[in-house]
């Protein structure tokens, strides 16, 4: 009964300036990534409460010529029924999906996908998550089939499809000599159900409201 994540959180999506503007003007059309190497499967991706990391990611894409102008769009998100990969229960669920995929591939002599580095990577970050993406998508497919079968046969089901997926990722080198955490560690959110996104916004700069209040009183 603790699987639904209550409350709202803030996510930031790194993208091209044109996408940022489209989402502001037409927030009903949600871009969905379906790359075979997506870290958390298919959906719309956000950096949890991390504007700087989202902009850094977009800037790297700009430098590589993959987008024209780096930008970030913020979103208010309700994770709802979330496959949270910081939760032991859901880690076991994804591991079960891997075992199913491994057995099916072994049975026909097929090699399962593997996570790969994107070019030389001294830290072994494995940025191309082919294995993880395939495993997570298989989990979603199995749940979807079970839900449909139950409804067709019994008229109801006790199972539920995930609205979102959340994962903690260790990336980059040690933050400093001997550090136990990495310089690019972050939490990513993948939204599958677009209704989880309650609205988009542009980042605003923080205001020193105490100084402003004192200035008003002085005047």
Image: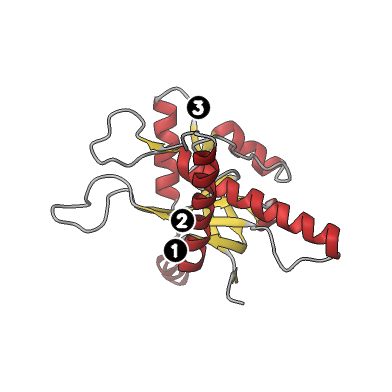
In the rendering, at what x and y percent does residue 43 appear? 60, 45
Q: Residue under circle 2?
A: 167
Element under label 1? loop
Circle 1 packing at 10 Å, graded few (<14), some (14-19), many (20+), is: few
Q: Residue under circle 1?
A: 86
Q: Nearer the viewer, residue 213 or 152?
A: 152
Q: Which mark is nearer the camera, 3 or 2?
A: 2
Element under label 3? loop
Q: Nearer the viewer, residue 202 or 179?
A: 179
Q: Which of 161 and 171 is in front in this view?
A: 161
Residue plotted at (68% across, 58% down) = 161
Q: Which mark is nearer the camera, 1 or 3?
A: 1
Structural distance between the alpha carbons of marks 3 and 2:
25 Å
Q: Looking at the picture, does residue 167 appear above or below residue 68?
A: below
- Name, please, the residue furthest toward the left: 177
Label placed on residue 189: none
Disc with the residue nearer the chain's start (1 vs 3): 3
The quadrant in which residue 146 appears is bottom right
In the rendering, at what x and y percent does residue 78 appear? 62, 62
Question: Coloring scheme of the render?
Answer: secondary structure
Q: Looking at the picture, does residue 12 appear above or below residue 80?
A: above
Q: Can residue 54 be seen in this view?
A: yes
Label placed on residue 67: 3
Q: Do the residues labelled 1 and 2 touch (CB within 8 Å)?
A: yes
């Amino acid at each position: 009964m603790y699987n639904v994540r209550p409350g709202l959180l803030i996510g930031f999506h790194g993208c091209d300036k044109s996408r940022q503007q489209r989402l502001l003007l037409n927030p009903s059309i949600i871009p969905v990534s379906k790359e075979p190497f997506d870290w958390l499967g298919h959906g719309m991706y956000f950096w949890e409460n991390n504007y700087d990391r989202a902009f850094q990611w977009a800037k790297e894409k700009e430098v590589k010529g993959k987008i024209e102008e780096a930008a970030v769009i913020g979103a208010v998100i309700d994770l709802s029924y979330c496959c949270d990969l910081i939760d032991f229960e859901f880690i076991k669920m994804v591991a079960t999906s891997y075992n199913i995929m491994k057995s099916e591939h072994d049975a026909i002599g097929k090699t399962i996908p593997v996570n790969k580095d994107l070019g030389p990577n001294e830290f072994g970050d494995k940025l191309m998550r082919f294995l993880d993406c395939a495993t997570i998508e298989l989990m979603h497919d199995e749940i979807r089939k079970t839900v449909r079968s139950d409804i067709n046969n019994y008229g109801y089901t006790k199972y539920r499809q995930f609205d979102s997926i959340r994962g903690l990722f260790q990336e980059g080198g040690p933050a400093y000599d001997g550090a136990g955490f990495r310089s690019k560690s972050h939490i990513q959110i993948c939204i599958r159900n677009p209704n989880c996104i309650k609205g988009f916004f542009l980042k605003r700069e923080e205001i020193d409201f105490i100084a402003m209040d004192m200035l008003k009183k002085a005047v």
